[in-house]
Amino acid sequence: MARLPIVVQPRASRTSVSWEDGVIRVRVTAPPVEGRANEAVIQALAEALGVRRSEVRIVSGERARRKQVELPLGEEEVKARLGG
């Protein structure tokens, strides 16, 4: 398990996940209303990293653009899977 920083951009034109400057950048089309963006972030991370949704957890920053997520992979494995 690893805790990694992410930066979220809600209301993006398309959903994407990338490794940029030591953080995971997640762009989602969902608005930051009633937890919809957070759910979209979890879904996007799970799909991009090839893990189950239940293995991705937001541990801090639930109402902020900068968050900490807990993933079942190490940092090097995440970078490799995201092409970083």
Image (spheres, rainbow, N blue to C red):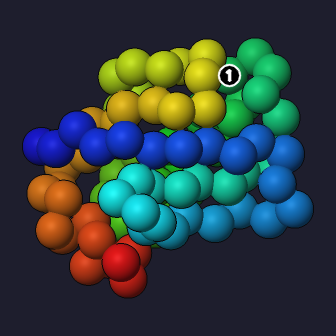
Residue 71 versus residue 46 in the image, above or below: above
- Residue beneath label 1, please? 35
**Is residue 34 toward the left or the right of residue 49 in the image?**
right
Visible residue check, residue 55: no
Q: Position of residue 34 (x, y in %)?
A: 75, 16
Quarter of the image that includes the N terminus: top left
Q: Nearer the viewer, residue 54 or 84?
A: 84
Q: Is residue 46 above or below residue 49?
A: above
Q: Residue at the far bottom: name it.
A: 83
Is 55 placed left or right of 8 in the picture?
left
Mark 1 falls on what kind of element?
A: loop
Residue that lies at the very extreme toward the front in this rendered image:
21
Q: Is residue 57 above or below residue 27?
A: above
Q: Is residue 74 above or below residue 65?
A: below
Total residue callouts? 1
Q: Is residue 29 visible?
A: yes
Q: Position of residue 47 (x, y in %)?
A: 48, 64
Q: Is residue 63 left or right of residue 55?
A: right
Residue ID at (54%, 64%): 17
Q: Which quadrant holds residue 83?
A: bottom left
Residue at (46% x, 66% y) in the render: 20
* Quadrant of the rendering where the C terminus is positioned: bottom left
Horizontal and vertical percent position of residue 37:
69, 35
The residue carrying pointer 1 sits among few (fewer than 14), some (14 to 19) or many (20 or more) residues within 10 Å by Cα, namely few
- Going by the numbered disc 1, the residue's amino acid type is Gly
Residue 42 or residue 13, whichever sits in front = 13
Nearer the observer, 48 or 75:
75
Residue 51, x across and y down, in percent = 32, 59
Drawn side of residue 74 relative to residue 51, left or right: left
- Residue at the (76%, 42%) spot, across then down: 10
